[in-house]
Image (cartoon, helix red, strand yellow):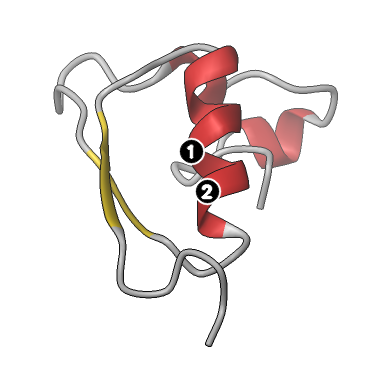
Amino acid sequence: MRPFEGIRVIDATHVLAGPFAAHQLAAPEADVIKAEHPDEPDQSRSGGTDPALAERPMGTGF
């Protein structure tokens, strides 16, 4: 069993620190649900150094 297996987290954060924290919870198997406004998605989805990745709707972290 992984450390956070079976734990569900709702992530309503945006920009940098919150999404990073949610990613850190997901790494040891927490079930993270990202909630954001469809017309104003998380700003970190369009950031990053690679313009081709910045255009993808899932964010540059993937």
The structure residue drawn at horizontal position 47% and vertical position 64%, both measured from the top left corner, is: 4
Report x, y in % for residue 1.
Answer: 53, 88
The structure residue drawn at horizontal position 62% and vertical position 60%, both measured from the top left corner, is: 27
In the depicted structure, whether residue 31 falls above or below residue 44 = below
Label 1 CA crowd tier, 10 Å (few <14, some 14–19, many 20+): many
Mark 1 residue element: helix
Report the number of discs.
2
Q: Which of 6 and 48 lies nearest the eye of the viewer?
A: 6
Residue that numbered label 1 is attached to: 22
Report x, y in % for residue 22.
Answer: 48, 38
Q: Which of 15 and 52 lies nearest the eye of the viewer?
A: 15
**Kind of residue at disc 1:** Ala
Q: Which of 21 and 36 lies nearest the eye of the viewer?
A: 21
Q: CA distance from mark 2 to mark 1?
A: 5 Å
**Kind of residue at disc 2:** Leu
Q: Which mark is residue 25?
A: 2
In the depicted structure, whether residue 26 falls above or below residue 5 = above
Label 2 CA crowd tier, 10 Å (few <14, some 14–19, many 20+): some
- Quarter holding residue 14: top left
